[in-house]
């Protein structure tokens, strides 16, 4: 299998008629981890939701190709089955459906009829991954995200990531609301996924998470597009100088902010 | 961005809409006359008192006006129905004796398999008579009677007469009068003092003749300290003209006894389902209704418990699913007549494709019902903008020493939830199914474990298309 490839060209996205993402470009390959940083309201989460196909986010122009397949032509579930994954900032709760049932249905949906995952194999894999994330066994039987704390929800997102094994994952502020231990577990989970067949885009405000998951590239997003790309050192520079310093360096003057 | 909105699967399609050739050996003419009632009674070789009871019911039916509340019943034409259809002459006791065509229908519903594996006794009503009836030996040894109602009248007339029509009088409402006049089939259950039935008693009902009314009559008596769980599921094939189902379930729960009655009403979308279900609880008795209403054009059904004895308890757990052209008007009544009584009503409704679901409930506390309490919860899930729901609670409180809670919640399947599930690779149909199944989970988890798989499948098929 050749490494998967995600190519985004000149993406423009509007939410309720308001233009938020204005010419977003990104190339990622399997085996790479990229970080996407930037101040609040520059459109980072909008990129993530639009790539996954959230109905509220309208792609007005541009292209997104996963292994040369046009993602933008696909329904949400087709994108997922093609290999996209989005760890959400605010995961939904689904009452009455156990985490385990949900995961098994999702896995079997990907594998297709007649190729369902054997139950014992599923349970063993789930136990192993939950163990790695230091999640209590009871999480398998609890209803999806219902009554979960913020940190538990985030870990649950990573559990799904590990179980579903997508080609590309976007982690939308997976570190927000996590204490240092949870941060480490999440990082451990993501690092365990590292392979030629997996690429990951980490959206974050803070350099902290990047101490645990070392990115190959760091992108700074402002005003709806990537304004600077560098290596891990860019995140450190940002931590030191803040976004204002970055703006000054890049000569970005107007402080036009948009909703995330 | 998904360029095309995916078509929502049509979950209204009735999956058990197969229909067998009519194998009836006897059926009455259309319309209901005194002659027909006499004919039914004669055919069944009934005692005089039952014929008289039927005739009283008939005359009350004639003069009683149609109910002016609840669902719209204007499409119901009493002159265009057949009131009695007898499919075979003798009741089959073992599976081999059941005619092949009927057997095929049952096979499609998976009854024999369920029976082989787990069931203590199966009594499946096909058209108006019970054609298949079996009981496990242990039950018979304990003195449990589990018969179709017609046979029970023949074999246990004294016991029968003592309780028949005592919980629900023929004059209770127009449809109880109609049932009194032309009832046929149903189950008769008697659990002797102190006998605890460990496995549920099961009956399947099915109507399969166009424009045929089905008026089954179920009578359950749970004697002192005894305990039983009775389960009944219904499916019917699709027909073009309207059918009427107007059953009666009477339950008498004696001192310290326990009864749970679980039913899945799964009629085809043109059936009028107008059922009267009521239980009386004596001291410290418990009655639980677990009631699912999935199909039918119109349902009016309010399982009730009369808490007559001190410290008695009643509960109702209902789900109603109303789709296109359907009106599910259901709920429960709890009548507190004695001190220290308690009741719970949990109603879960789903409205979709322009359907309407109504919760209509009544809780009554009499002056004697001191230190009694009631808890009511109504949850509605609305699937689209065309569907509607109403919650209509009536409370009558005639003493101050009670407590009552009422919670009502209406939610919609949200874009966010669908997006979340679909982003994990579930199709829109699977995602919707998952949300719906989760919503009714408090109901499905109450079904008997041994039977849950089959019942779950039935609910899924009928509500949501198939998950596989």
Image (cartoon, coloured by chain):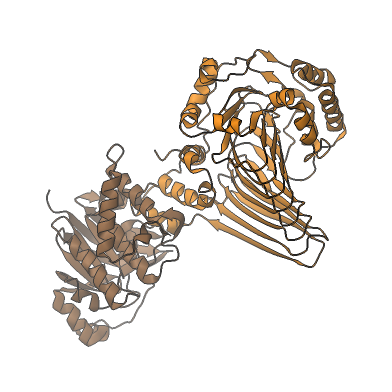
Q: Chain A appears in which tint?
A: brown
Name the residue nearer the viewer: A4 or A250: A4
Quick check: B202 above or below B309? Answer: above
Q: Position of residue A102 (x, y in %)?
A: 37, 52
Q: Position of residue B331 (x, y in %)?
A: 67, 49
Quick check: B122 above or below B426? Answer: above
Name the residue nearer the viewer: B405 or B3: B405
Residue at point 25% right, 81% down?
A: A252
Q: Is residue A38 visible?
A: no
Q: Position of residue B313 (x, y in %)?
A: 68, 54
* Quadrant in which residue B26 is drawn: top right
Quick check: B393 above or below B193? Answer: below
Relative to B314, A231 lies left or right: left
Name the residue nearer the viewer: A57 or A136: A136
Q: Is residue A91 visible?
A: yes
Relative to B398, B356 lies left or right: left
The quadrant of the rendering that contains the C terminus of chain B is top left
Quick check: A22 above or below B468? Answer: below
Q: Position of residue A199 (x, y in %)?
A: 19, 60
The quadrant of the rendering that contains the N terminus of chain B is bottom left
Residue at point 52% right, 20% down?
A: B95
Q: Chain B appears in which tint?
A: orange
Relative to A224, A18 lies left or right: right
Relative to A222, A194 lies left or right: left
């Amino acid at each position: 299998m050749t490494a998967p490839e995600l190519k985004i060209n000149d993406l423009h996205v509007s939410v309720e008629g308001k233009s938020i993402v204005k010419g977003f470009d990104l190339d990622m390959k399997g085996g790479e981890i990229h970080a996407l940083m930037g101040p609040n309201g520059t459109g980072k989460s909008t990129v993530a939701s639009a790539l996954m196909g959230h109905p509220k986010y309208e792609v007005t122009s541009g292209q997104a190709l996963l292994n040369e397949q046009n993602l933008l032509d696909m329904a949400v579930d087709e994108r997922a089955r093609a290999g996209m994954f989005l760890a959400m900032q605010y995961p939904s709760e689904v009452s009455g459906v156990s985490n385990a049932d949900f995961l098994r249905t999702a896995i079997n949906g990907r594998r297709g009829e007649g190729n369902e995952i054997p139950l014992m194999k599923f349970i063993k894999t789930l136990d192993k991954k939950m163990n790695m994330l230091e999640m209590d066994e009871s999480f398998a039987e609890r209803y999806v995200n219902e009554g979960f704390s913020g940190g538990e929800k985030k870990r649950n997102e990573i559990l799904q990531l590990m179980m579903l094994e997508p080609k590309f994952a976007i982690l939308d502020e997976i570190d927000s609301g996590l204490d240092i231990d949870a941060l480490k577990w999440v990082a451990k989970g993501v690092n365990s996924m590292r392979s030629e067949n997996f690429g990951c885009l980490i959206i974050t405000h803070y350099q902290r998470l990047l101490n645990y998951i070392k990115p190959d590239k760091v992108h700074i997003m402002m005003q709806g597009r990537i304004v600077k790309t560098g290596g891990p050192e860019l995140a450190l520079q940002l931590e030191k100088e803040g976004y204002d310093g970055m703006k000054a360096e890049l000569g970005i003057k107007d402080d036009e902010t948009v909703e995330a | 961005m998904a360029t095309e909105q995916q078509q929502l699967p049509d979950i209204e399609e009735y999956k058990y809409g197969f229909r067998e050739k009519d194998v009836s050996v006897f059926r009455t003419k259309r319309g209901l006359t005194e002659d027909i009632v006499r004919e039914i009674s004669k055919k069944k070789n009934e005692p005089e008192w039952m014929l008289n009871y039927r005739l009283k019911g008939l005359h009350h039916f004639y003069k009683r006006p149609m109910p002016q509340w609840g669902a719209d019943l204007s499409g119901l034409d009493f002159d265009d129905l057949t009131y009695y259809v007898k499919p075979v002459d003798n009741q089959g006791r073992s599976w081999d004796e059941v005619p092949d065509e009927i057997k095929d229908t049952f096979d499609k519903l998976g009854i024999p398999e369920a029976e082989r594996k787990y069931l203590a006794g199966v009594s499946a009503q096909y058209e108006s008579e019970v054609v298949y009836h079996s009981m496990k030996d242990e039950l018979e040894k304990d003195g449990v009677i589990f018969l179709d109602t017609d046979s029970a009248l023949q074999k246990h007339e004294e016991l029968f007469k003592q309780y028949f029509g005592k919980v629900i009088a023929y004059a209770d409402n127009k449809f109880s009068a109609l049932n009194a006049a032309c009832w046929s089939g149903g189950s008769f259950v008697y659990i002797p003092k102190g006998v605890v039935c460990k496995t549920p008693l099961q009956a399947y009902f099915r109507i399969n003749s166009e424009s045929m009314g089905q008026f089954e009559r179920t009578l359950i008596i749970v004697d002192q300290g005894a305990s039983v769980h009775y389960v009944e599921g219904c499916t019917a094939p699709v027909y073009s003209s309207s059918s009427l189902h107007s059953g009666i379930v009477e339950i008498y729960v004696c001192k310290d006894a326990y009864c749970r009655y679980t039913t899945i009403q799964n009629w085809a979308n043109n059936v009028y389902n107008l059922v009267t279900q009521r239980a009386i609880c004596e001291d410290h008795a418990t009655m639980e209704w677990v009631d699912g209403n999935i199909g039918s054009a119109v349902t009016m059904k309010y399982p009730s418990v009369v808490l007559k004895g001190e410290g008695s308890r009643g509960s109702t757990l209902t789900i109603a699913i109303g789709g296109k052209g359907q009106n599910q008007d259901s709920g429960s009544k709890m009548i507190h007549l004695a001190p220290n009584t308690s009741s719970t009503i949990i109603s879960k409704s789903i409205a979709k494709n322009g359907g309407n679901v109504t919760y209509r409930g009544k809780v009554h506390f009499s002056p004697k019902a001191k230190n009694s309490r009631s808890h009511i919860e109504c949850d509605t899930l609305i699937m689209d903008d065309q569907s509607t729901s109403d919650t209509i609670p009536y409370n009558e409180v005639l003493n101050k020493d009670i407590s009552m809670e009422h919670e009502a919640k209406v939610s919609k399947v949200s874009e966010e939830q669908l997006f979340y599930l679909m982003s994990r690779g579930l199709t829109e149909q699977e995602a919707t199914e998952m949300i719906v199944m989760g919503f009714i989970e408090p109901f499905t988890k109450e079904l008997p474990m041994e039977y849950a798989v089959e019942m779950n499948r039935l609910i899924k098929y009928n509500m949501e298309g198939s998950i596989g």
